[in-house]
Image (spheres, rainbow, N blue to C red):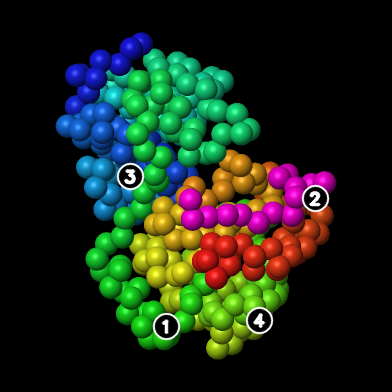
Amino acid sequence: MKLQTEEIKKILCIKPRGIGDIILSTIVLENIKTALPNTEIHYLTEDFARRTVENNPYVDKVLTFNKNDFVLKVIKKVRLEKYDLIIDFWSNPKTAQITFFSFAKYRVGYKKRGRKYAYNIISDSGDSHTHAADTHLLLLNEIQIPIVSRKIHFYLKDNETEFARNFIKGYFYGDLILGIIPAGGWRSKRCEPEKWIELCNAIQKKINTRFLILWGPGDEHDAHEIKNNLNENAVLIPDTDVGKLAALINECNLVLANDSGPMHIAAALGVPVIGIFGPTNPVNHKPYSEKSDYIMKEDLHCIKCNLLDCPFNHECMKELNPDNFISKIKILLDL
């Protein structure tokens, strides 16, 4: 089916979860708005992730649902909006149902087994060499929307920026600030606290800096252990929400991060960031910005295993060489 752009007044983008996944999907927004400047763009996410696209000048409305909501409840909410075009960037069984029963004339999604019924415009989802951000652009190609931008987006609120600046003023006095992010959705993605401590001590010997420990739910143990061992060289942020965490990231000169949502927030904000990779492939998931790089122990037989838990000794994290971090930090910060 060929898209008749003059018919498109209201669009829904579906990307329910994964803070990083949603941020990567925002690569489509500037392109859609450039091609269809008078079109409303809405987002459908799970409630916990709504802040990821809130305050975005390209997004007119955010619809939310909870993971365990009955699908008919979500369908009803979507139907009431009377969308002309739905782009399902998730294309799982639930979002396929939501898309199909939306009554939207144009329904766009990925070619996945058992879900073709839901879409009348279908795209491949790329290959092993396609970055996750770029897979979203494949759907735009199918509806003939020109790609004029490859920027991902996250926007801070004024109160979040004010909070972060006041916090930084209380602890840092002209210091070079390196943020460290021990978060990671999988256990296998998480660099152990002992390794973080080793890395930070090695960096401190070569670069005059202090560390800001950035953490969220589930990171408490690792964050406190790192802080307790780095003493005055590190500052632990308080319990925050996603927006305030992002604002604190924005105050850093550079961020070191496991493959995680906050890593992608840093990239979207334009903060220099080095991602740490082991079980996941950086070709597909590395920070999507020019001011970024990644670290990986490439010579392991099990690297890029894609397993949630390591069946060995987590060598991909434990055997990382601090010198590689130091050299990449110096390049990104032009030291």
Q: Is residue 150 left or right of residue 305?
A: left
Give the residue furthest to the front. Answer: 334
Q: Mark 3 = which residue? A: 64
Q: Nearer the viewer, mark 2 or mark 1?
A: 1
Locate residue 228, reporting x and y percent.
61, 84
**Is label 3 in a helix, a strand or a loop?**
strand
Give the residue at mark 4.
Answer: 205
Residue 299's mark?
Answer: 2
* SS for dot 4: helix
Q: Nearer the viewer, mark 2 or mark 4?
A: 4
**137 versus 58 height, above or below:** above
Q: Quadrant of residue 85?
A: top left
Can residue 246 be seen in the rendering of this structure?
A: yes
Q: Position of residue 141 (x, y in %)?
A: 41, 23
Q: Earlier in the sequence, mark 2 or mark 1?
A: 1
Give the residues drawn in magenta, as a range: 290-305
User: Which secondary structure, mark 2?
Assistant: loop
Question: Which residue shows up at 52% across the image and 51% down it?
Answer: 287
Find out whether the residues at labels 2 and 3 contact each other: C-beta distance under 8 Å: no
Q: In the visual, does 225 lie left or right of 147? A: right
Determine the image quadrant of residue 104. Answer: top left
Name the residue that disc number 1 marks.
Answer: 174
Pointer 2 or 3: first along the chain: 3
Where does the image place residue 46, in percent across and percent down from the top left?
39, 46
**Which badge, 2 or 4, comes first in the chain's sequence?**
4
Asked whether residue 328 is drawn in magenta, I would say no
Pair 3/1: label in front: 1
Our reading of the magenta stretch's main secondary structure is loop
Quick check: marks 3 and 1 in contact, CB under 8 Å?
no
